[in-house]
Image (spheres, helix red, strand yellow):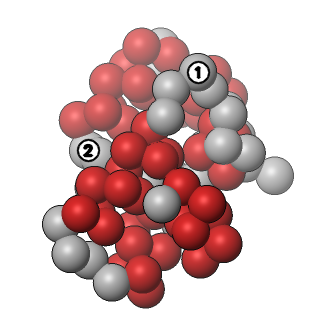
Amino acid sequence: MALSQPHLAHLLGLAVDAVQESIKKHEEVLLPTRGRVADMGSTLIHAEKIISLYMDGYPETEIKRRTGHSYDSSERYL
């Protein structure tokens, strides 16, 4: 079970805004939050990240490693 950003904030004793800012500031660190694992949210951040890596010439294995998505998920986005 993955935690949501509010749950992380509570456990860390931080405001949700602080958690969100930290996640944005350190995009290279992919936390398996509930939104990322369940592919939730109103934005296409997962698709954008995968497509961007693909367009930059990264192989599927590296895209999988960097995003935490399966090969099937990555293919769906592409």
Badge 1 is on which residue?
42
Location of residue 52 with respect to 39 vertically, above or below: below
Checking the image for residue 26, the label placed there is 2
Pointer 2 local density, CA inside 10 Å: few below 14, some 14–19, many at least 20: few
**Labels 1 & 2 near each other (Cβ < 8 A):** no
Q: Report the front residue among 71 and 66.
A: 71
Q: Nearer the viewer, residue 51 or 61?
A: 51
Residue shown at the point (28%, 55%) measured from the top left: 52
Q: Please state if 30 lies on the left or on the right of 24 as rendered.
A: right
**Residue nearer the viewer, 25 or 15:** 25
Eyeballing the image, is 55 above or below 47?
A: below
- Give the residue type that dot 2 points to: His
Give the mark nearest the N terminus, 1 or 2.
Answer: 2
Q: 25 or 58: nearer the eye?
A: 58
Q: Where does residue 78 sit, x and y in percent of width and height?
A: 48, 60
Dot 1: element: loop
Question: Label 1 sits on what residue type?
Answer: Ser
The reply to whether residue 63 is in sight is: yes
